[in-house]
Image (cartoon, rainbow, N blue to C red):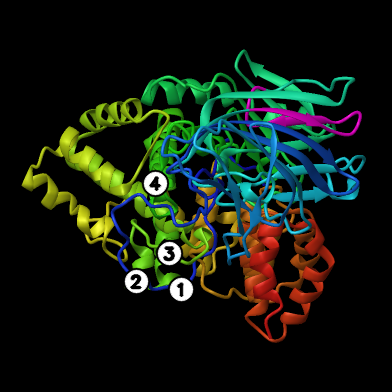
């Protein structure tokens, strides 16, 4: 079965973590970040000079983090975030200084206390990473695509940068950085900075990021990596065995950058490159400045899934350019990005295409609300994650409810006026952080102007400080999905798959077709669909994952060998979680889940392991 050329955006992007039950109180309006133990709100930490050695054999990073500070408030100590780091020594303005590593707190790690003088200018921390660094995935050669060389990559969002750099780790704390990275001979190092495009002989690489960024956007990849240009300011990196396929798949990335600029102003980060990582990468993509980290599951061979890049690219404005001040304000990052992403795809592919994205996103929002609880404050846009892992807030609420609020505002005031507002918003807050309350004040001053009629139509309070899905939530036009619904009905009424009208369907149509099937199809129905559309062997990871979930429900064992192959080679938490969860629902399938997880757990990133350990190992 051939699928259409462009496909899933929202479901491919830096996807949310599976939702959790929870009940929390109203968050305070102040921008106090409770997920950092640093005191960077009182001591200006302006620049990092990083000098590290990456030991792939020993699976350890060691080196020095040299911080330039301004102790304007004459504090007696500097506090930095750490997680499972060994601190060898500390220098303050070149002189050895005492330090204290506080007992570790859940989620937050250990605060590093460093005594400083009133006029201290630089603090150097000599350190090593530990075995439990949540940001790092060390891959042996057999865990990579080419299976020839070891590989390392980082995933620092939300508060994992502290597990490989002693730092002030909060989204509201920005700093510039330069880095010197030593790696094994023959390997290439890349960062979220100005990057080399080929291996050098020295095995030492130098990086520079002059634009201040928060710690969660610090990124590093080391491996046997090659580069291919797309145009003068975009290109791709991947392992040699994948590079040609990746370059072909991402042919239109340059056009996406131009389209984004036409909507909301210039791209301000210089180059926009993408690295496709080995299979264990736990999310769809991560918007590290200048270098998006991307899952190989988007390489379908027909460009049907590369619209993931629209989401990661949009982060160059929402998230990277204008950043949520705390993780309680996470919707300001992802909600804006999903809205922007869909505007890019509407511009490139037309309104009926983006309508499908909006509807699939609405379905995901419904699922998230059902899982969390329709009355839970965890379904508010403004969260209170006090005492909790900030990853608890990385659900579809921030992504889909946030974007639908912006869509509601657009429909209320008009697209032209809303686009002008967003352009002004990005310009006025460029390279700054913002809270929910600050955004609402800006919205009132620059767009709504206290107009009670507009406020009543939008009902902002219900969106930001209310649970569930607001009554005025907009819905997309169902023109294309209505046709899909008709074909599904025909099939369920006995029409053979060969007689259905599916020519030209995109991934979105196939997902809608399968999502709305009855909970359990018969073996005969599964076989008929499989024989006609080759779903078990599809190269489209989005469709494959949904099909395998359906196969578990139906006991369609013909798909199980392909499912095992999928689980052995895919590390995206978004795909792994529903498959293992479906197997764990019934006692008959639990042994299969535990057996497969035991075999392939080592291929998964530590963040995916945390989620799946709790799910698969429960009794």
Sequence-wise, the earlier of marks 1 and 3 is 1
556 sits left or right of 353 in the view: right
Say which of 469 and 191 sits in front. Answer: 191
Disc number placed over residue 374 in the picture, else none? 2
CB-based contact (under 8 Å), mark 4 and mark 3 = no
Between circles 1 and 2, the one closer to the viewer is 1
Residue underneath mark 4: 335
Q: Is residue 404 above or below residue 122?
A: below
Q: CA distance from mark 4 to mark 2?
A: 19 Å
* Residue 257 is at least partly visible in this image: yes
Element under disc 4: helix
How crowded pointer 3 is (Cα within 10 Å; few <14, some 14-19, many 20+) is rated as some
Element under disc 3: loop
Residue, far left: 452
Q: Is residue 502 above or below residue 273?
A: below
Q: Which portion, as a residue range, is magenta?
A: 178-194
Q: CA distance from mark 3 to mark 2?
A: 21 Å
Element under disc 1: loop
- How many circles with numbers are drawn on the protein? 4
Say which of 476 and 361 sits in front. Answer: 361
In the image, residue 227 lies at what x, y percent?
75, 24
């Amino acid at each position: 079965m051939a699928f259409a050329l462009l496909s899933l955006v929202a479901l491919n992007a830096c996807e949310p973590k599976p939702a959790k039950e929870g009940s929390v109180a109203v968050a305070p309006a102040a921008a106090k970040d409770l997920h950092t133990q640093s005191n960077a709100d009182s001591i200006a930490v302006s620049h990092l000079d990083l000098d590290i050695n990456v030991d792939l054999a020993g699976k350890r990073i060691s080196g020095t983090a040299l911080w330039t500070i301004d102790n304007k408030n004459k504090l007696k100590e500097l506090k930095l975030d750490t997680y499972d780091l060994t601190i060898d020594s500390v220098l303050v303005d070149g002189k050895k200084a005492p330090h204290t590593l506080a007992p570790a707190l859940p989620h937050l790690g250990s605060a590093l206390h460093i005594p400083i003088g009133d006029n201290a200018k630089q603090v150097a921390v000599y350190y090593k990473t530990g075995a439990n660094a949540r940001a790092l995935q060390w891959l042996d050669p057999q865990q990579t695509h080419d299976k020839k060389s070891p590989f390392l990559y980082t995933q620092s969002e939300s508060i994992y940068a502290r597990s490989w750099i002693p730092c002030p780790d909060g989204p509201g704390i920005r700093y510039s950085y330069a880095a010197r990275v030593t790696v094994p001979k023959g390997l290439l190092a890349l960062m979220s900075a100005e990057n080399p495009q080929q291996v050098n002989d020295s095995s030492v690489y130098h990086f520079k990021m002059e634009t201040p960024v928060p710690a969660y956007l610090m990124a590093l990849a080391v491996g046997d990596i090659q580069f291919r240009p797309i145009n003068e300011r975009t290109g791709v990196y991947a392992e040699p065995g994948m590079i040609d396929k990746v370059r072909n798949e991402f042919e239109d990335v340059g056009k996406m950058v131009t389209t984004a600029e036409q909507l909301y102003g210039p791209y301000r980060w210089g180059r926009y490159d993408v690295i496709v990582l080995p299979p264990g990468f736990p999310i769809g993509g991560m918007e590290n400045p200048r270098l998006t980290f991307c899952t190989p599951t988007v390489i379908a061979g027909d460009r049907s899934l590369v619209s993931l890049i629209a989401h990661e690219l949009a982060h160059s404005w929402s998230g990277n350019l204008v950043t949520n001040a705390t993780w309680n304000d996470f919707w300001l990052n992802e909600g804006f990005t999903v809205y922007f992403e869909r505007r890019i795809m509407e511009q490139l592919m037309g309104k009926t295409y983006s309508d499908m994205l909006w509807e699939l996103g609405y379905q995901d929002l419904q699922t998230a609300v059902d899982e969390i609880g329709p009355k839970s404050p965890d379904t508010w846009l403004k969260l209170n994650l006090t005492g909790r892992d900030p990853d608890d807030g990385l659900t579809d609420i921030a992504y889909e409810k946030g974007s639908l609020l912006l869509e509601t505002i657009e429909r209320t005031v008009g697209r032209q006026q809303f686009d002008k507002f967003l352009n002004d918003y990005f310009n006025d807050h460029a390279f700054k952080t913002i809270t929910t309350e600050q955004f609402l004040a800006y919205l009132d001053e620059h767009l709504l102007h206290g107009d009670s009629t507009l406020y009543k139509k939008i009902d902002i309070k219900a969106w930001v400080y209310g649970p569930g899905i607001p009554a005025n939530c907009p819905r997309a036009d169902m023109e294309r999905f209505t046709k899909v619904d008709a074909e599904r009905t025909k099939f369920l009424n006995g029409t053979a798959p060969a007689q259905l009208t599916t020519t030209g369907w995109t991934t979105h149509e196939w997902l809608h077709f399968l999502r709305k099937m009855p909970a359990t199809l018969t073996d005969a129905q599964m076989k008929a669909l499989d024989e006609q559309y080759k779903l078990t062997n599809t190269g489209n990871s989005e469709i494959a994952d949904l099909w395998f979930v359906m196969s578990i429900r139906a006991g369609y064992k013909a798909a199980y060998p392909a499912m095992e192959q999928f689980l052995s080679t895919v590390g995206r938490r978004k795909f792994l979680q529903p498959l293992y969860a479906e197997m764990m629902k019934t006692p008959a399938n639990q042994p299969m889940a535990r057996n497969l997880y035991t075999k392939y757990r080592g291929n998964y990133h530590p963040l995916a392991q945390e989620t799946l350990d709790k799910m698969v190992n429960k009794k």
